[in-house]
Amino acid sequence: MTMCGVKFRAYPTPEQSKKLSHWIGCARVIYNSKVEEDRKNYLRFKETGEKTPVNQSFAQFKTQERPWLKDCPSQVLRNSAVNWFVSKQRFFKKLSANPVKKRKGEKDTVLLTNELFSFQKTNKPNEAPSYNLFIGTKTNQVGILKFVAHRDFELPKQIVVSKKNGQWFVSFCYEVEDIPEESEETLLQTYAALPEVTLKEITVGIDRGIAIPFQLNNGQSHDLEDKAKERLLKKQRRLKRYQKKLARQKLGSKTREKTKRKIGRLHTKIANIRHNFCHQVSHEMATSEAAIFAVEDLQLKNMTKAPRPKKNEQGQFIPNGAKAKAGLNRELLSKGLGKTISLLEYKARRRGKIVIKVPAHHSSQECAKCGHIHPENRKTQSEFFCLSCGNHDNADLNAAKVIAKRGIQFLLSKPQAKTRTRLGISRSKAGRGARKTQIKETLDVQVPMTPEAMPL
């Protein structure tokens, strides 16, 4: 049994938009009220030691100061309280952070269970099934919400209606039985049992960078098309112009609100272009003949951090290269280096394939033929010249070949059953020092960096 998720664009009428916005606002008030109530209970516990049980009650928030809560279906308020309760339980299990208040305009969503919606068939005989989405109760109806389904789907048990930058969406998950999906551990054991010759044929190394976002060891590369780059550049220039205009406008004015909406729509269009690129690249890789995808284990969150401020001997702040680093971070994030691999992981697993993350250290300085590592091997961004064997190749292509060799070496080391694809590092509750020792041993044993230890 596999869970599939879909997200469709919705087109509510002005009256429907107003009512759905009211429901979203009521759900946000209940959620924020539960967060505030929990904070007060915690402060009371620190002062008096009195413990207050965590529950899902919300009736105490329907006061005379909030008469508009009575105009919202109680199921919507209940679902919001349940969302907070689930988030709080995840916090107790150390799976997420403590729930915080939601701000208007950020993730405006409302959860609707099957008491609040129904899908009604509208298709004729011998035609593909199509549905109308009816939202509301007998006493509080939104009506039929128009949405565009770009793919077939199964009927869900709950849906989420969301609004972002003036656009409405309907998203939900449903179970699918005809998609066999094996676990990562099973796939890892299956491919680890293959001989080295077979692994060479089905393994692809992927080098990620700025000049070439995705370079494969078989010579293929993936980058935005020229038209997409022109569209991005055009929208980024327009975005910069609107941001300057916004800075000069009066706070709270209607023209400033219009400019903010334009900026939001531009951000959405830019994100859609990049998201489309990530889906296209990941789909092309997942549907290729390769079955094993080796990628660098890049810590993009750490790579895109702002530099620390610098001070001279007198304690005065001096330039720290923050502007140049901001430009580098912008380029790294704009290529979708992490999003594409995340999409590739689930698309490959559905097809019985696997993604392996290998160490990224010295991959750009190591020779794919002899294994010699030296900073002088790569003097420029695009050229690689080995000082030991004289191998001359494109720098990104050489790095992709090195990554593929490391992925094969990892599989040949035959990891244990309870390991993950990220170098077989266990997710046990060991201490920080034990994890560091385990990672070091894994790197030393599974990915030897000397030419004699390389199997290829």
Image: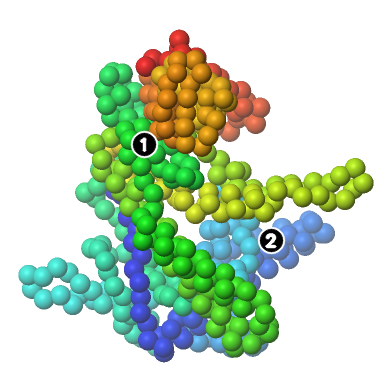
Local packing at callout 2 (Cα closer than 10 Å; few below 14, some 14-19, many 20+) is few
- Residue 202 image position (x, y, % from top left): 28, 29
Question: What is the number of the mark on residue 52?
Answer: 2
Side (left or right) of 131 relative to 409 = left
Q: Residue at x 47, y 45 (%)?
A: 211
Q: Residue at x 32, y 39 (%)?
A: 220
Q: Give the camera-side residue of 84 and 201.
A: 201
Q: Secondary structure at mark 1?
A: strand
Mark pair 1, 2: CA separation: 57 Å
Question: What is the number of the mark on residue 216?
Answer: 1
Q: Residue at x 61, y 23 (%)?
A: 437
Disc number lying in front (1 or 2): 1
Question: What is the number of the mark on residue 399?
Answer: none
| Vertical position of residue 104 compared to residue 19: above or below | above
Badge 2 amino acid: Thr
Side (left or right) of 366 relative to 348 = right
Q: Secondary structure at mark 2?
A: loop
Mark nearer the N terminus (1 vs 2): 2
Q: Quadrant of the C terminus?
A: top left
